[in-house]
Image (cartoon, coloured by chain):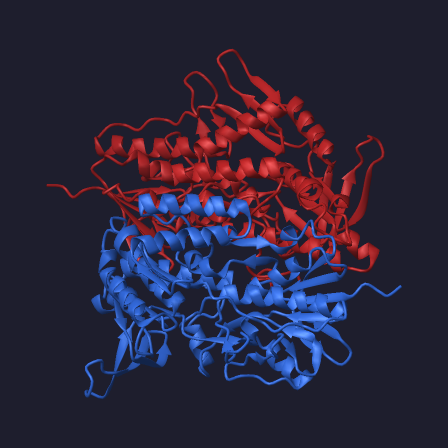
Chain colours: A red, B blue
Amino acid sequence: MAQTPRVVIIGCGFGGLEAARALARADVEITLVDKTNHHLFQPLLYQVATAGLSAPAIAAPVRHLFRTQANLTTLLGEAVAIEADSRCVRLKDGALLPYDHLIVAAGSTHSYFGHDDWAAFAPGLKTLDDAFEIRRRILLAFEAAEKEEDPALRAACLTFVVIGGGPTGVEMAGTLAEIARHTLPGEFRRIDPAQARILLVEGGARVLQTMPESLSQRAREQLEKLGVEVRTGARVMAIDNAGLEIESASEALGKGLSSYRLDSRCVIWAAGVAASVLGRQLAGATGAQLDRAGRVIVGPDLSLPNFPEISVVGDLAAAHSHVPGQEPKPVPGVSPGAKQMGRQAAANILRRIAGQSTAAFRYADYGNLATIGRNSAVVDLASPLGPLRFSGYFAWLFWLFAHIWFLIGFRNRLVVLIDWASAYWSKQRYARVISNIEPQRREAP
Amino acid sequence: MAQTPRVVIIGCGFGGLEAARALARADVEITLVDKTNHHLFQPLLYQVATAGLSAPAIAAPVRHLFRTQANLTTLLGEAVAIEADSRCVRLKDGALLPYDHLIVAAGSTHSYFGHDDWAAFAPGLKTLDDAFEIRRRILLAFEAAEKEEDPALRAACLTFVVIGGGPTGVEMAGTLAEIARHTLPGEFRRIDPAQARILLVEGGARVLQTMPESLSQRAREQLEKLGVEVRTGARVMAIDNAGLEIESASEALGKGLSSYRLDSRCVIWAAGVAASVLGRQLAGATGAQLDRAGRVIVGPDLSLPNFPEISVVGDLAAAHSHVPGQEPKPVPGVSPGAKQMGRQAAANILRRIAGQSTAAFRYADYGNLATIGRNSAVVDLASPLGPLRFSGYFAWLFWLFAHIWFLIGFRNRLVVLIDWASAYWSKQRYARVISNIEPQRREAP
């Protein structure tokens, strides 16, 4: 009798989680490796960073999620190399995991476009630890302003700059405006938090560039209504511990380039993502190609050209959607894409075990949504009758219920709903806790 | 017209919080200084350490608690010295806070009885950061056991030692037993978490020594029923990164002293408290005396002998309860004691402002309670008809509602109640999140 096929899945984000679930009833032995002990519901991570939710509300222990899936073993560890020729994954602690089929779902991290020194001054938002660091900086900026005597320095403490006008940047900027205008007023004696400036800096011509232009425009209007200064066509040239330098292609055309400085004690990076470094190692080991963002270029069935037993899914994969009779289209880096890729990679493993040929990946695009703040969001849904686009209060309600629906685990959904209901009515944010006032890492000098 | 009297309160634990509230309607200018941004509900901190509650559930932002108290300014900062002669408090950042009346409620920290090097191997539980560190060690010990091949090392990973049989030690040991027996089974593939050993090591003759002996005995029985090995008369001689050395006055009398080693990867310190270091500085500046635990010995009205404008309350104070016609009795280091002292110190400030003489402190003892685990607790209530003592399920229900009742802020109460109801029915603990697998500090070499 043949040995049960061994499947190793690296990463327990949306892609890895769905792949593991899709194999729940298969006659395989799965090892799911992740360097954290939890699946993180990344779309709500900005809520942890802005003190609206506690970490456990959006993070579920991987081991608990899979407790009843008997064909799966959870392993806490960091995959550092894929030894494709000997079909092994090497972990940081030196352990080797042999596989017959491998799904690499190691995700992405933030990219500073070659300026890694900016990380100290403008933390990005990918992990719970990132969220705690950003929460610490936001809350301490208001505390520092309350103590500061010098008006210019006090203004710098009350200037918050979010770099990057994608969904995360828009959500962060909108929520910061809410905190300054609705949560904190009345709590300070020397400053008025409502005087805080929130700037959203975007290099391109508009925010939410993956959305239709009309919704970008609506998002901008809603941000401005909340009191966010939106600066498009503004490139970040330098960041230091006191602020940043911006070069602006003036919005009134013909005025050319101008550059200026913004003094800020709290700069948040929401501008770029780069594929996990594991992608580069995998390319070296298999001869696979990387795209400009460092993502691994996969074949139509999500596997690697010369290694059909290795699939790459999620943010680490440069994948295309294949619809018969149409040009292949790139799959966007959103959670539904990662989930669908995970399921497809799992299905293809079962086909290969059964001796069948694998199927090409086809992305089902249900649309796109982003929230801006209290009562405001933009929604762009795909429907058989054409795109359905709306914004404002109903878009916000739609966004709210969609996110709660997709949260992992019933208890989390209930707690998040209660937290939000209470935050909505009280305008309060209950997770305003800094566990350690001293910086734990990456402090600006 | 005379200047409004300035009151400075150092510390926002139970004592400082109650003092500030008691002055809410007084014509004074209060500055409340704390080195964290939150009031911590310490009696439930062990629940954060054992992944039952999230941090925000038991920590309320100080600034928010006092937002409507117009005579109070919150200041985030650490008091490092009291300059009693010039009536100023010096903060770590160099700022000076002048006062007319001062309440020092700086609390306590854990004490390793001169063995400060043990802190690296056996973290104590005083702050949220401590709780996260203990949570990390508990959860990672099970993960390490799952990966360990060597049976002896695996057994050490699955051996948890709690040092100190006071309320915190009893709660920690009972909850660890629950986690091992009820929460984790079924989630691992190579180990059986129910095989974990939980030891509670106490130097004295019984656990919960401030309780009547009958309740200590009931607590011990309930711990043993949960699977905790209780070792009384056991003194810790050494702790290192692989375990600890214990010297035991054998429980069978006449057998004399014996010493032995326990191999453990997770040792938790719940044995001793020491007064905040600010006490020593205050004694030097004022000539006040310290007791053996480093607490400041205060007069009957909680003020210092030569400095009536300085009061010390809470864990930092060695105070006595004064009942006319009776011997003064020491006030126990529990939260009701701290709260009552805080209110008394505030009332005495108002008396002094009004030109009246101050009143002696009288401690109202409502009793004592401790929980052991699921469905078990011990309660010792003072009543006009004599002490009311009970244990088991009803004691647990009593403990539960008493703690939820005293939690600060309505929302927290509701969330804690939901968390507990869900944990009770599912036997799950939802806050099993480690934000950073790598140690942030104090790691054993």
Decide if residue B329 is in sight here.
Answer: yes
Q: Nearer the viewer, residue B391 or A188?
A: B391
Tell me the residue at 82%/59% (across/down).
A150
Q: Position of residue B46 (x, y in %)?
A: 42, 60
Q: Residue furthest top?
A: A385
Q: Which of the pair B435/A367 is nearer the observer?
A: B435
Q: As drawn, is B296 to the left or to the right of B110?
A: right
Q: Quadrant of the N terminus of chain B?
A: bottom right
| Location of the C terminus of chain B (image quadrant) | bottom left
Say how many tags the image has.
0
Q: Quadrant of residue B22?
A: bottom right
What residue sits 28% from the left and 73% below the top? B263
The quarter of the displayed image where residue A120 is located:
bottom right
Residue A113: give x, y in percent of width and height: 61, 47
Residue A236 percent across, percent down from the top left:
71, 46
Residue A268 x, y percent position in the rendering = 64, 48
In front here: B384 or A346? B384
Residue nearest the viewer, comparing A134 with A15: A134
